[in-house]
C-alpha cells in the first residue's frame, strides 16, 4: 500500500489547510452512500465546524453516478464551490474525471479495486482496501456494499482528524438509537481508521479541528423544515402527489404529525393527510378543505404546479385560503428533475387565466422554510387567497447548517372567519345585510362563513362564475368589474403584510444586489469577495411578492442593482421591471441555469464583468 | 310513515322545517329537463329524511347538471367547482366536518369524460357521499356534442354519427369497488327519491346514475337517453323503499317472502320488493351480470344494483376527533414550545 503511494504521487507540502475545503464523494446511486456521507456531515457539524452538504444525483434509482459534496468553511460560507480539494472515488466509471477535477495538491481517496492509473503527479492518492476490510469484518453479503462506504468514513476520520466519538454520535442520531445498525457500521469505521493509522502516511495538507462555529445552529433540510413549520402553523389537511423534489415535504408531515399533532386528551389526529391520484386532485382536495375552514396545504414542483393552475385560479377568484409549496426543479417540461432552479417565478406570479395575481413567499434559508411554513397559513387566511411558498431542490433536499427553528412569535390568526356568534355580530353590524363578498372594512378582504355553521343565513354557494357581494350568480358588467377591483385591492393589502425584505448594507456601497431564496449563501459570499476587490455592495433579499415599498426604495437608491437568480430569463427581474417600470433601467440581470446551485465566484465574476472590471 | 303523515298535516317535518325550507333558487335549465325533476326529488328526500339543510353540503362540477345545486337547499353551503373535479373538492371539504352530509351533482361529461379519473378514485376511497350523475348522453351547455355515455352510432344534428362505444357509469363504479351503485330514470321520481334517501344513509360512496333526458339536444325517441325510450325500456329490478331506523310499521306493509331487506350502517333499511325476478344487490358478480345483460338486450335496468353496507368508509380509516376538524381551537393546532426545543435538540 505505502509503495503505491510513493509511485502515484509526488506531493508538495504547503502550509496546512484547516477547516476550509471541499470533499466530493463519487459513488453509484443506490449503493447506500447517503448514510456514510450524512454521518460525516453530522460528525463535522458536531465538532463545531460550519458545513453544508449537497447531493448531486441522477433521476434514477440504481446504477448511475452520484456525487455528494461537503463544504467545510470556518467562516460559515456554505454555497457551492466549483472545485474539489478532496475526492473520494468509489465509482470506476467516473474515476478519471474526478481525478482531473482536483485542485493541484488535492487528495484522491479511492477504492483499491479500481484498477485505473492515477495519472496526475500534483495530487496525493490514498488507495483504500475496501473489499479486504469488509471481508475481514464478516459483514453479511447483502450488506457488504452499504457497509463498504463506512470504510471511507473511517479512513477520512483518521487522515483528516475527524473525531470518532462524534462519528459515533452521528451514527446514533442517523439510526435513531438502533444499536445493531450503529454497531455494525461503527465497527467498520473503527477498523478502517485503525487500518489507515497503521498503513497510510499523512502527506496531504488538509485537516479539520474542533471549533465553536455551530452554536445556535442545527442541520436540517428545507422540506423537513417546511413540514415542521406547517405543523406548528396548525396545518389540518394536506393532499399531495409524489414528485421530486417535493415528496419529502409531505412525507415529513406523515413522519412528524403523529408525535406532534395527536390530541393529548382524545388521542385523535388533528390533521389529515391524503395521497391523491394526481396533482389535479391534490389541489382540488386542498381547495375543498381550505374552503371548509381547514388550514390546508400541498407540496409540489413545477410540473405539478402546472396541473394545479386551474384550481388555483378558482381559489384566487372564489377567495379560498390555502398554501402550496413549490419546491422548484429545472424545467421546462420534465427538464432536470433532480437539479435545482428558480424557474417558476414568473409563471407562478401570473398563474391561471384571466387577471390573477398570487402572493408568493421566498424562504432564504432552511430556518426560514420553517418560519414560512407556519406564517403562510396566517397570510392565507388573513388574505383569503392561495399563498405559494417558493422553495427549491437545493433547500428542499439538501442538509443545511441553519439557525435553530424559532417558535412562532405571533398567535395563530384565522382571519375574518365567522362562526355562529361572529355571524350574529356581523348581522347586527350590517343590519342583516351581510354578504360573503362584501368589503366591509375597505381592505378588499371580505368576511367568510364555512360549512358547518348552523345559522341558516351563513350558507352561500361558492362558484367560479361571476358573483355579486352576496355570492349570487351575476353577469352584470359593473358587478364583475367591482369584484375584480376589490381582489386587486386585497393584493395591495398583501404588500403591507407579507414578509419584508432583509437588507444587509456595507459602508459606501455603490451598487445594490437583489436576490431571493437559495441563492442567498452564494450572494453573501460573493459580496465578501467583491468587497475584498474594492466593490462594496448593499443587498436586499426579497422575501415575498407582490413587492413592498422597501424593495422599491432599495432599488431607487442605487444607479445599478444586480438581480441574481437561477433561471435563464431573469424572472425576478422581469417582475421588478413590470412593477416598477420607472426604475427598470437601473436593474441588471445576473442569471444563469445549468442545474447547479450558483457559486459565489460566478456571482462575483458576473457583477465585476458588468461593472467593467 | 306515521311521523311523516303527521308532518304532512302540520306541513313541517320532525326538525320543524317546511318543504319550502329545502328549496333552492328557481331553475334556469330548460323546461322539461330531467335535472329539474331530480332537484325536486333531492328536496323531497332531504325533507322526508328530516335533514337540517345546514348539515348538508352540495358540490358540483361544470355542465348543465352542475348548475343544479343552485336549485335545491338554499340553506346549505355549496361549491360549484371545476369540470370533472368535483370529487376532489368534495373530499377535501368533507374532512372539515364528517358530521355533514355531502351530495354531489355531476353529469355524464363531468363524470365519464373529463372526470372519469377523479370519479373512480373517489369511489375507491369510499368517502361517505351521495354522488348523483344526471346522465343525458350529451353536452347540453355547449350545445349538443357527444358525451362519453352517448350510444354508438347516435346521430346528432351538428356532430354526425358517434363512432365510439359508450362508458357505463355503473359498471365503472362497480369495477372500482363502489359500495352502493344504483341506476334510475328521471321519469320515475318515486324511485329516484327512495334511492337518494337510501344513499344518504349509506356509510360510504353512493353512486346513483340517473338517466335524465335532455329535451333540447337529445330527446330522440329511439335514443336511450330519451323519455320515450326510457319509459318503454325500463326494467325495474325491484320496487325500492327506504325505511328509517325503527320505523316498524312500514316494514309490515311488505308481504313476507316478496321482499329483500338491506340494513344500512345507521340502522335504516332498504326494502326491495321483488318484481319478476329475485335480484340480490349484495352479490357483486350478479351486479356485473345484470349490467352486461342490460347492455346486450337494450334494457334500462333501474334500482339498487349493488350495495355493501359493511365496507369501512374513508373516515373509518382516519383517526379523526369527534369535534369537527374545522372547529378545533387554535390551542389544539399548535404544539407546545417544548416540542420545538426537542426537535432542535434532535437535529
Image: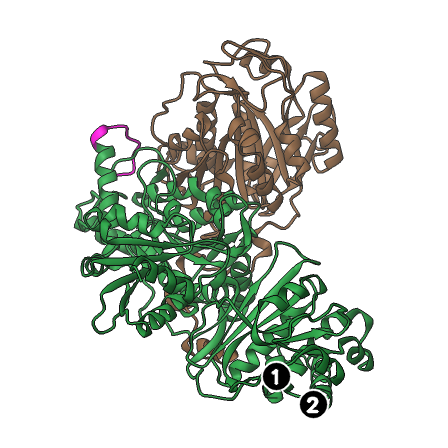
- The residue nearer to you, when weighing A612 against A128, is A612
In the picture shown, does residue B252 fall above or below A386? Answer: above
- The residue nearer to you, when weighing A252 against A237, is A252
The reply to whether the magenta stretch includes residue B95 is: no
- The residue nearer to you, when weighing A400 against B224, is A400
* Label 2 crowd (10 A; few <14 / some 14-19 / many >=20): some
In the picture shown, does residue A289 fall above or below B23? Answer: below
- The residue nearer to you, when weighing B138 against A420, is B138
Which residue is label 1 attached to? A167
Q: Is residue B327 visible?
A: yes
Judged left or right of residue A394, residue B163 is right
Mark found first going from the N terminus, 2 or 1: 1
| Chain coloured green here | A
- In percent of width and height, residue B241 lies at 59, 32
Judged left or right of residue A591, residue A238 is right
What is the CA distance from the residue labelled 2 to the residue labelled 1? 17 Å
In the picture shown, does residue A193 fall above or below A405? Answer: below
| Chain coloured brown here | B
Q: Chain of mark 2?
A: A
Q: Which mark is residue A197?
A: 2
Quick one: SS at disc 1? helix
Furthest residue in direction bottom, as rendered: A198
Which marked residue is nearer to the observer: mark 2 or mark 1? 2
- In percent of width and height, residue A208 lies at 54, 85
Q: Report the magenta residues as a range.
A: A470-478
Picture quadrant where residue B25 is located: top left
The N terminus of chain A lies in quadrant: bottom right
Give the residue displayed 76% in from the left and 83% down from the top.
A3
Q: Is residue B14 visible?
A: no
* Label 1 crowd (10 A; few <14 / some 14-19 / many >=20): many
Amino acid at each position: 500500500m505505502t509503495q503505491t503511494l510513493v509511485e502515484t504521487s509526488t506531493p508538495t507540502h504547503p502550509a496546512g489547510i484547516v477547516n476550509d475545503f471541499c470533499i466530493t464523494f463519487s459513488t453509484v446511486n443506490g449503493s447506500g452512500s447517503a448514510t456514510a456521507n450524512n454521518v460525516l456531515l453530522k460528525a463535522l457539524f458536531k465538532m463545531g465546524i460550519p458545513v453544508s452538504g449537497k447531493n448531486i444525483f441522477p433521476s434514477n434509482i440504481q446504477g448511475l453516478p452520484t456525487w455528494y459534496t461537503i463544504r467545510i468553511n470556518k467562516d460559515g460560507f456554505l454555497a457551492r464551490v466549483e472545485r474539489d480539494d478532496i475526492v473520494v472515488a468509489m465509482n470506476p466509471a467516473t474515476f478519471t474525471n474526478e481525478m482531473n477535477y482536483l485542485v493541484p495538491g488535492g487528495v484522491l481517496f479511492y477504492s483499491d479495486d479500481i484498477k485505473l492509473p492515477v495519472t496526475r503527479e500534483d495530487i496525493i492518492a490514498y488507495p483504500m482496501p475496501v473489499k479486504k476490510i469488509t471481508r475481514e469484518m464478516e459483514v453479511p453479503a447483502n450488506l457488504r456494499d452499504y457497509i463498504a462506504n463506512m470504510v471511507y468514513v473511517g479512513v477520512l476520520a483518521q487522515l483528516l482528524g475527524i473525531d470518532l466519538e462524534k462519528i459515533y454520535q452521528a451514527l446514533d442520531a442517523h439510526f435513531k438509537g438502533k444499536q445493531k445498525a450503529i454497531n455494525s457500521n461503527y465497527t467498520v469505521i473503527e477498523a478502517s481508521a485503525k487500518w489507515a493509522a497503521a498503513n497510510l502516511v499523512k502527506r496531504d495538507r488538509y485537516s479539520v479541528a474542533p471549533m465553536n462555529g455551530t452554536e445556535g445552529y442545527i442541520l436540517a433540510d428545507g422540506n423537513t423544515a417546511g413540514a415542521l413549520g406547517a405543523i406548528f402553523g396548525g396545518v389540518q389537511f394536506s393532499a399531495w402527489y409524489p414528485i421530486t423534489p417535493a415528496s419529502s415535504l409531505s412525507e415529513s408531515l406523515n413522519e412528524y404529525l403523529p408525535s406532534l399533532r395527536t390530541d393529548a386528551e382524545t388521542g385523535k389526529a388533528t390533521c389529515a393527510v391524503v395521497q391523491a391520484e394526481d396533482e389535479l386532485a391534490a389541489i382540488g382536495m386542498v381547495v375543498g378543505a381550505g374552503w371548509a375552514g381547514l388550514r390546508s396545504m400541498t407540496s409540489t414542483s413545477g410540473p405539478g404546479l402546472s396541473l394545479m393552475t386551474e384550481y388555483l385560479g378558482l381559489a384566487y377568484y372564489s377567495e379560498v385560503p390555502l398554501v402550496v409549496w413549490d419546491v422548484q426543479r429545472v424545467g421546462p417540461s420534465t427538464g432536470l428533475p433532480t437539479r435545482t432552479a428558480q424557474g417558476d417565478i414568473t409563471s407562478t406570479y401570473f398563474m391561471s387565466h384571466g387577471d390573477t395575481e398570487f402572493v408568493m413567499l421566498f424562504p432564504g434559508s432552511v430556518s426560514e422554510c420553517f418560519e414560512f411554513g407556519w406564517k403562510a397559513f396566517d397570510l392565507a387566511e388573513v388574505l383569503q387567497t392561495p399563498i405559494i411558498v417558493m422553495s427549491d431542490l437545493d433547500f428542499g433536499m439538501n442538509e443545511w447548517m441553519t439557525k435553530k427553528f424559532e417558535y412562532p412569535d405571533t398567535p395563530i390568526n384565522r382571519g375574518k372567519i365567522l362562526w355562529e356568534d361572529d355571524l350574529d355580530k356581523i348581522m347586527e353590524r350590517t343590519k342583516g345585510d351581510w354578504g360573503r363578498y362584501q368589503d366591509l372594512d375597505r381592505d378588499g378582504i371580505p368576511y367568510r362563513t364555512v360549512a358547518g355553521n348552523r345559522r341558516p343565513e351563513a350558507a352561500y354557494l361558492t362558484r367560479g362564475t361571476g358573483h355579486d357581494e352576496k355570492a349570487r350568480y351575476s353577469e352584470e358588467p359593473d358587478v364583475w368589474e367591482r369584484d375584480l377591483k376589490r381582489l386587486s385591492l386585497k393584493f395591495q393589502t398583501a404588500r403591507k403584510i407579507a414578509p419584508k425584505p432583509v437588507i444587509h448594507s456595507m459602508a459606501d456601497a455603490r451598487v445594490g444586489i437583489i436576490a431571493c431564496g437559495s441563492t442567498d449563501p452564494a450572494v453573501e459570499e460573493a459580496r465578501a469577495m467583491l468587497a475584498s476587490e474594492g466593490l462594496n455592495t448593499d443587498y436586499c433579499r426579497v422575501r415575498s411578492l407582490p413587492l413592498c415599498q422597501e424593495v422599491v426604495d432599495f432599488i431607487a437608491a442605487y444607479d445599478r442593482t444586480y438581480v441574481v437568480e437561477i433561471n435563464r430569463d431573469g424572472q425576478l427581474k422581469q417582475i421588478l421591471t413590470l412593477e416598477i417600470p420607472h426604475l427598470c433601467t437601473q436593474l441588471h440581470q445576473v442569471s444563469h441555469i445549468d442545474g447547479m446551485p450558483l457559486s459565489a465566484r460566478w456571482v462575483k465574476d458576473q457583477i465585476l464583468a458588468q461593472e467593467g472590471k | 310513515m306515521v311521523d311523516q303523515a303527521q308532518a304532512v298535516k302540520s306541513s313541517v317535518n320532525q326538525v320543524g322545517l317546511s318543504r319550502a325550507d329545502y328549496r333552492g333558487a328557481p331553475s334556469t335549465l330548460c323546461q322539461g329537463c330531467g335535472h329539474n325533476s331530480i332537484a325536486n326529488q333531492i328536496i323531497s328526500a332531504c325533507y322526508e329524511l328530516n335533514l337540517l339543510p345546514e348539515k348538508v353540503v352540495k358540490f358540483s362540477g361544470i355542465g348543465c347538471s352542475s348548475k343544479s345545486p343552485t336549485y335545491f337547499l338554499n340553506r346549505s353551503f355549496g361549491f360549484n367547482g371545476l369540470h370533472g373535479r368535483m370529487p376532489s373538492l368534495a373530499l377535501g371539504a368533507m374532512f372539515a366536518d364528517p358530521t355533514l352530509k355531502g351530495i354531489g351533482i355531476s353529469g355524464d361529461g363531468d363524470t365519464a369524460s373529463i372526470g372519469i379519473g377523479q370519479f373512480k378514485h373517489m369511489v375507491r376511497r369510499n368517502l361517505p357521499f351521495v354522488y348523483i350523475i344526471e346522465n343525458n348522453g350529451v353536452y347540453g351547455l355547449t350545445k349538443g356534442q357527444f358525451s362519453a355515455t352517448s350510444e354508438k352510432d347516435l346521430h346528432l344534428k351538428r356532430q354526425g354519427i358517434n363512432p365510439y362505444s359508450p362508458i357505463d357509469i355503473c359498471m365503472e363504479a362497480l369495477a372500482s369497488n363502489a359500495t352502493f351503485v344504483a341506476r334510475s330514470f328521471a321519469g320515475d321520481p318515486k324511485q329516484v327519491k327512495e334511492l337518494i334517501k337510501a344513499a344518504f344513509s349509506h356509510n360510504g360512496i353512493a353512486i346513483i346514475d340517473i338517466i335524465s333526458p335532455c329535451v333540447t339536444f337529445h330527446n330522440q325517441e329511439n335514443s336511450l337517453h330519451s323519455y320515450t325510450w326510457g319509459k318503454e325500456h325500463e326494467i325495474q329490478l325491484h320496487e325500492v323503499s327506504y325505511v328509517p331506523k325503527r320505523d316498524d310499521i312500514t316494514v309490515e306493509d311488505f308481504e313476507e317472502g316478496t321482499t329483500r331487506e338491506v340494513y344500512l350502517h345507521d340502522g335504516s333499511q332498504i326494502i326491495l320488493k321483488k318484481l319478476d325476478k329475485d335480484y340480490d344487490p349484495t352479490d357483486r358478480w350478479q351486479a356485473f351480470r345484470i349490467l352486461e345483460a342490460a347492455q346486450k338486450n337494450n334494457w334500462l335496468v333501474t334500482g339498487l344494483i349493488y350495495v355493501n353496507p359493511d365496507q369501512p368508509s374513508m373516515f373509518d380509516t382516519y383517526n379523526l376527533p369527534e369535534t369537527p376538524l374545522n372547529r378545533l381551537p387554535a390551542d389544539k393546532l399548535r404544539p407546545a414550545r417544548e416540542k420545538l426545543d426537542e426537535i432542535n435538540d434532535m437535529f
